[in-house]
Amino acid sequence: MTTQQDLPRGTGTPDPVTPGRAPRRRSRAVPRPNEGVWPGLATPPAAPVKARIAETLFRNAVRTLPVRIVFPGGERIGSGGPDSPVMRIERPGAFFARLGADSKIGFGESYMVGDWTTTDLAGLLTPFAARLSTLVPPALQRIGRRFAEARQPAAEVNSLEGSRENIHRHYDLSNELFALFLDETMSYSSGWFADGSDDLVLAQERKIDGILDMAGVREGMHVCEIGTGWGGLATRAAQRGARVTTLTISQEQKDLAERRLAEAGVADRVQVLLRDYREARGSYDAVVSVEMIEAVGVAYWPTYFAALDRLLAPGGRAGLQSITMPHDRMVVSQKDYTWIHKYVFPGGIIPSVTSIEQNLAADTGLRITERRSLGPDYARTLAHWRARFTDRWSEVEALGFDETFRRMWEFYLGYCEAGFRVGYLDVHQFALARP
């Protein structure tokens, strides 16, 4: 049970229960950002030996990074010059204790509670991301995975019920929250910027058109979309003259998507179903799915790809957009439990291009016929989101979100932006068809 002692100051206010809907049962203590509940976060772990080891590893790792690490009292390490990002470690004891207990979670948690600060979060995290796989020696990484680091909880497996709870914990934080930092298309995925343009709305429309083109969507077709979001892609497909059946497992997203579709004048062409991809039925001229596979989980990739194949009519094409990571890193880290899992995307796993190809070959008759990479575009997209979130923080705060949430969301957006900046993460659009 979460007690008041577990909560840092400024816990926010609970979201009201939606009328007519029973509150979700919670069998274990998990962060609930929209209620200001942060189990155990306020107290750093008591791990003096691990803390000393973590401090030694951290000092060795950052000594050659182009950053400046500043400790209380003025000690400085790092190889950065006067214009390089600065990381100020405000509470070294707590910082190294969290890092020693579990580096994949403790680094982000220590930022959330203010153990360290910076004036350029994405800039600071970028050199860390560039050397993510080599900051800790491989032998120590293997020891850490075996003995020290947490593994993904069984409760977050992406079964039918598990997926609904995992999606609820992120996408149902607040429709108003997402509306404040996303653009007017409400696209929560990478844009695709035209040369010379920094307009996020145009980039999102170009991205949507790009994936619809890959799936060959045109007038008179019946399209299945797996992962509705807030209806932006379904709206665009309907404006092309297609009929759309779009699937979501978020009641909150469904409600807002239907309102937005009505406002766009295409509600008569789009059906929004509260349905998991595993429960989908029918035969469609095209199937599209944008950045939904990351929430599927390795164990269910065969089922997901088989669903794309099963739903696609003969001669049809599918458009898939997915964040990707290097295959070797995916293989060694796929069971890790990270800060992103704990606070942002429970149950998530980013595939590699190789794993997508392998699953298509093993479980479908589909093959990749075209692809494009949008990695640098995602870094720019995230920078837009981070700036909008920061600029509109007072409005976010008015929704009931606390200061810990602000630092959590800043870290999430900056952490992801850094990964795309250096190519540790990428995002691809794929056209899929039967040979």
Image (cartoon, rainbow, N blue to C red):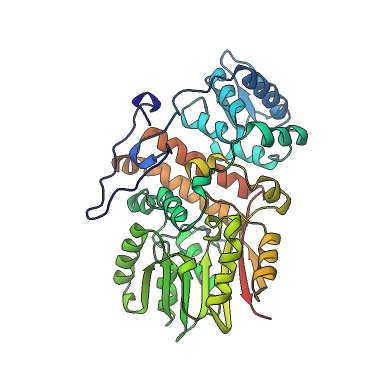
Task: Point out residue 289 in the picture as x, y percentages from the top left corner.
Answer: 52, 67
Nearer to the camera, 156 or 64: 156
Split into 4 quadrants, where in the image is the C terminus?
A: bottom right
Nearer to the camera, 86 or 431: 431
Task: Point out residue 260 in the picture as x, y percentages from the top left corner.
Answer: 32, 66
The correct choice, above or below, for 261 with respect to 217 in the image is above
Q: Quadrant of residue 50?
A: top right
Furthest-top residue in this view = 73
Asked whether residue 178 appears in the rendered view, the answer is yes
The correct choice, above or below, for 72 with respect to 347 in the image is above
**Residue in view at x 53 percent, y 23 percent:** 45
**Residue in view at x 45 percent, y 35 percent:** 407
Q: Quadrant of residue 49?
A: top right
Task: Point out residue 305 in the picture as x, y percentages from the top left corner.
Answer: 59, 68
Q: Quadrant of residue 95?
A: top right
**Residue in view at x 27 percent, y 51 percent:** 22
**Residue in view at x 48 percent, y 27 percent:** 114
Is residue 57 found left or right of 217 in the rendered image? right
Split into 4 quadrants, where in the image is the N terminus?
A: top left
Is residue 207 found left or right of 231 in the rendered image? right
Asked whether residue 345 appears in the rendered view, the answer is no
